Image: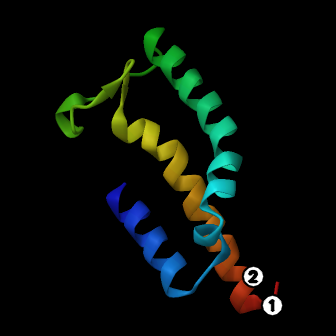
């Protein structure tokens, strides 16, 4: 997860992409979907549909979700927005 977050920030800064310039807008666009998926994840874990091996996690938990799981729903969409912006920049979009 660190590589995704760090790499995304570096790409945004290196290529001066729009997402890092409009971080508030990007965050607000990701927030509703991320919240929905985090709630779904909480419910699924609570019902026993899946679980997390805490030996491989940092140990920080939000409700019943490891911090890494919550961050995933924000970091990965930001990464894909960055890739989209890179494609637009270099492929004439």
Q: Is 43 located above or below residue 73 in the figure? A: above
- At horizontal 60% and vertical 54% (from top left) the residue drawn is 77
Instruction: Specify the label residue 88 is tagged with.
Output: 2
Estimate the x, y position of residue 18 in percent, counting from the top left. 67, 74
- Identity of the residue drawn at 60% across and 31% down: 35
Q: Residue furthest top?
A: 47
Q: Using residue 63 as the reference point, say whether residue 55 is left or right of it.
A: left
Residue 78, given in percent of the width and then of the height, sits at 58, 59
- Compared across the picture, whether 35 is left or right of 69 comes to right
Residue count near mark 1 (Cα–Cα under 10 Å), binned few <14, some 14–19, many ≥20: few
Q: Is residue 31 above or below residue 53?
A: below
Are dots 2 and 1 in contact, CB under 8 Å?
yes
- Indicate the position of residue 2 as horizontal and vertical percent values: 33, 58
Residue 67 in view in this figure: yes
Mark 2: secondary structure:
helix
Q: Which residue is mark 1?
A: 92
Using the rendered view, name the quadrant where residue 39 is placed: top right
Q: Relative to 3, does residue 49 appear above or below in the rendering? A: above
Residue 54 is situated, as x and y percent measured from the top left of the image, at 23, 29
The answer to which of 84 and 51 lies nearer the viewer is 84
Quarter holding the C terminus is bottom right
As rendered, which of 37 and 9 lies closer to the eye? Answer: 9
Numbered label tally: 2
**Cα gap from disc 2 to disc 1, whole angstroms:** 6 Å
At 48% from the left and 8% from the top, the residue drawn is: 47
């Amino acid at each position: 997860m660190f590589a995704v977050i760090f790499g995304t920030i570096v790409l945004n800064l290196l290529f001066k992409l729009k997402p890092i310039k409009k971080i508030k807008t990007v965050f607000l666009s990701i927030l509703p979907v991320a919240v929905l998926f985090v709630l779904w994840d909480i419910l699924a874990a609570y019902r026993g549909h899946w679980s997390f091996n805490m030996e491989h996690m940092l140990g920080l938990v939000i409700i019943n979700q490891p911090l890494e799981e919550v961050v995933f729903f924000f970091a990965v969409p930001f990464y894909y927005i960055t890739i989209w912006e890179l494609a637009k920049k270099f492929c004439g979009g």
